[in-house]
Image: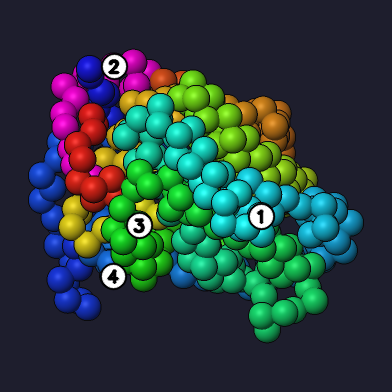
Amino acid sequence: MQTTRFSQFDIKPIVQVSPTTTLHRKTTSPRRLSPVFAVSSPTATSPSRGHQVTHSMPPEKLEIFKSLESWVSESILPLRKPVEKCWQPIEFLPDPSQGPDGFTKEVRALRQRVFGLSDEYFVMLVGNMLTEDALPTYQTLFNTFDGVRDETGSSPCPWAIWTRAWSAEENRHGDLLRTYLYLSGRVDMLMIEKTLQYSIGAGIDIGAENNPYLGFVYTSFQERATFLTHGNMARLAIQGGDPVLARICGTIAADEKRHENAYTKIIEKLLEIDSNTTMLAIANMMKKRITMPLHLMYDGQDPNIFEYFSAISQKEGVYTSRDYAEILEFFITRWELEKLEGLTGEARRAQDFVCGLPRKIRKLENRAKKLESRRVKFSWIFNKQVNV
Ligand SMILES: [Fe+2]
Ligand SMILES: [Fe+2]
């Protein structure tokens, strides 16, 4: 088996050894990552980008977000699903109210269903679950965005109402996957729980600069990426003989699609009223590269765990550099970026850069060297080895 090297996208990993000193860290692994998986975590506390720009949106732009509040109420808040119409994790899990015999029977059936799923599949499912379960990190991040943050924790501002509702919907994803993994008996919950604690402690650095233009570009991209990821996990669950897990992943994917729609509409609206700034924001985030959430993931043992998890997702076709290019192409079409007119010179250059990027990514991908795959052990599956 071979895997692909994407060294052209590498960002050198860093380790912060003191509050003021940042060193490049030597990794033991060859860099073989796609553009989406470019940063790894050596410690639970290190910032990943080495520099952090803050509050890059000029204060006068706050008015734009204020003026959009009624539009958010009319066009974005309806994309929430009422709680009474939402699925809940227990609907997909063994029902403890059936009494001990019925519950045990259902747990046994679950454990038999997952029998045909590979260790690689479980590593990906754990990584995806942790990505969902680190939700406090994302809600915190959203509340760093100027002009749209929840100022009180229960603010009636429509932007804040959306963020809380989004968080509440997302919260079910991690809960469901985590309980399913626990009952499967295939994973080391202690190591998974430690990874989650390290990871939430480490946080996330997407380079959004407290800037909602940048933040909403990221969330648009990320929701689509998770939609594709969970959808591919559903497909593999069917192949592995677990239709219930397939339904779980498919149901989560449907939520992600609805969220993608919300964030995509926000960028569409910003393009309509402030095309120059929005076009520059899209280019800004694409230059930084959209990093998967939880890129600072750490299990207390393996500093390369995020890289390995990402490499498996790439190899198994669950989330690949091809997907990255396709997501970008999707947004170029959806936001009609090629047709934008009347831009400033700088925004026109940003437009050219973004519209030409998918072709460049594909070209680099085709030219990328093939690397031998190798065996790597994962704490999440009791230190068993998988192909990376
Ligand atoms: Fe999610
Ligand atoms: Fe989502």
The label nearer to you, 2 versus 3, is: 3
Amino acid at the residue labelled 3: Met
Q: Residues within 10 Å of mark 3 (few under 14, many from 20)?
A: some
Q: Would residue 284 be found to the left or right of residue 348 on screen?
A: left
The label nearer to you, 2 versus 1, is: 1
The label nearer to you, 3 versus 1, is: 1
The label nearer to you, 2 versus 4, is: 4
The relative height of residue 268 versus residue 374 in the rendered view (above or below) is below
Amino acid at the residue labelled 2: Arg
Quadrant where the C terminus lies? top left
Q: Which residue in the structure is indicated by mark 4?
A: 45
Q: Secondary structure at mark 2?
A: helix
Front-lying residue, 369 or 172: 172
Q: Which residue in the structure is indicated by mark 2?
A: 367
Dot 2 or dot 1: first in sequence order is: 1
- Residue displayed at 68% across by 84% down: 152
Amino acid at the residue labelled 4: Thr
Dot 2 or dot 3: first in sequence order is: 3
Whether residue 11 is visible to the viewer of this picture, yes or no, is no
Q: Are marks 4 and 1 in contact (CB under 8 Å)?
A: no
Dot 2 or dot 4: first in sequence order is: 4
